[in-house]
Amino acid sequence: MSDKKEKMMSFAFAKRYVRNLSGAIAIMFAFMAPAIVGSAGFALDYAMAYLVQQRLAQAIDASALAGAAESTDEAEIESRIRQFFAENYPADKVGFTFEPQVEVVGDEVRVTGNARYDTSFVRILGIDEIEMQVKTVVARKVQGIEVVLVLDNTGSMGWNNNITSLKRASQSFINIMFDNASRDEFVRIGLVPYSNSVRVGSYGLGKNPDGSQYRDGSSFVTLPHDVSVTNNHNASSGWYGCVIEHNGTNYNENATYVDGSYGQLWKSGVNWNGHGWDPARGDNDSYPYDVFPDLADGESEYEGPFDIYQYGDVERRCVESTYVCTRWRNGRCRSGYNRCDAYDGYEYDVSSRPNNSCPYAQIVPINSDRDFLLSQVDPDDYNVMYPHGNTLGNIGMLWGGRLLSPAPPFTEGKAWDSEYWKKAIVMMTDGDNTRNGTYSSFWDTSNNNYNVATYNQRFEETCTNLKKMGVLIYTVTFTSGINDNTKGYYKRCATSEDQYYDAPGQEDLEEAFRKIARELSTLHIKE
């Protein structure tokens, strides 16, 4: 047989074989098709159920992290998680989901999610739906920041319009802090403008500046019955809002108001030199109440009452005398001394401004109202933070700590031991502590034993005790008129030397505040 014929026969055989094989496969597929299609359907159902479970897990994980990272309040955490879940697993997605269950236990946020997939193919086996559950646990890592700006508002800040530079620096600080927060509520800022004293204002009488009730409406300042409140710093009478520090030794807690007396204080015979505790004494020392206490060592915070700052003497006629006045002020015999100018026959009021050297600006308790905070340091508003008075940085620092504290007189601060909040103070001055010649937070100057060394020592003591409580302290000395001793204790007050800034000029001051704000803004909202 020729090769050609052999090849043709082989080809015909192969053709017949393939035809027969195809027919066999077709017959086999006809018998197997239901099983194959069923298997593919089952696989598709379970693949879709797996997809639903994966999406559920991703949505639950993301929601739990979002909720735990955006609040310290349990109700807010739960609300945020459910909102975030709804946004990340909308109703038009495959599968039916249920509202996640949220439980906050200590430092953990526990979230459970449930979903259901309605089957298409495995129904023939009696499986109408596939249920699934996903659980996740995340640690609460949120850290908000509470910071108080303690700002020098003394008279020297008026030189070269430095007070305006301080306002610009403060506004930059506030804006940077809020710009770098995921939510405003995690940044809380307070303000303490200081000079001879601090102005607690209406808060001391249980009222907000707008007249509405502050906290529970209780007072922490003792206002004598016949002393009115004034909003005019230069008024010849009335209380503008500053306070003097408490004297624990000579203070009579049972004193009551009687006519001709201001209860706890003042107006005792010829001794009517401003206001204080016992005008007959020369050692009215408010220690330890003028220092932030060592809470780490078990000391308690002083919560009040505080007494009103109001300097002034009463004008009164005195008996004709041959004594010659031995104390003079502004060319007149100083009242409060029973000696008169023989030619005049009168004692004169030495001050018609009882709120002299009280800061114009009022304390601002810590809050998250960005616009309000900015308005309190508005460089274009002449009526906020006006330079006036002498420097008592120790008093400013003390009230900075009081604003951060959760204890009265101001209670906005979070708990000292809260792991979800950091606390910080930015303390600045443009001068050395100064002993006012007449009056300050320590009452009449002639009736206490205070001096600059005392102020400095108590400033450092306050810094030490606040740092023990975990407060981050940044200090800034501004302008070149500050002596090395002041720079030294400001540097020691700071948490570290890197957190002390010496700012000779206005741009240096503003850059220091910007740098501090950038550093502090990295301390919060961490996952």
Image (spheres, rainbow, N blue to C red):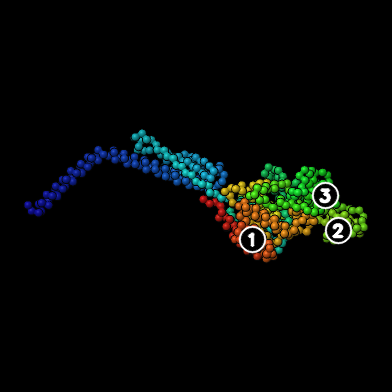
Q: In the rendered image, which quarter is residue 452 located in?
A: bottom right
Q: Which amino acid does label 2 sit on?
A: Cys
The residue that appears at 48% across and 40% down in the rendered structure is 99
Percent x, y of residue 21: 19, 44
Say how many tags the image has.
3
Percent x, y of residue 503: 64, 63
Q: Mark 1 points at which residue?
A: 491
Tell me the tag on residue 250.
none
User: Quick one: label 3 or label 1, which is nearer the N terminus?
Assistant: 3
Quick one: which residue is furthest to the front in this view? 297
Tell me the tag on residue 333.
2
**Which class describes the residues within 10 Å of circle 2: few (<14), some (14-19), or many (20+)?**
many
Tell me if residue 225 can be seen: no
**Which one is nearer the viewer's eye here, 436 or 361?**
436
Q: How far apart are marks 3 and 1 (CA)?
A: 42 Å
Q: Name the residue under label 3.
A: 267
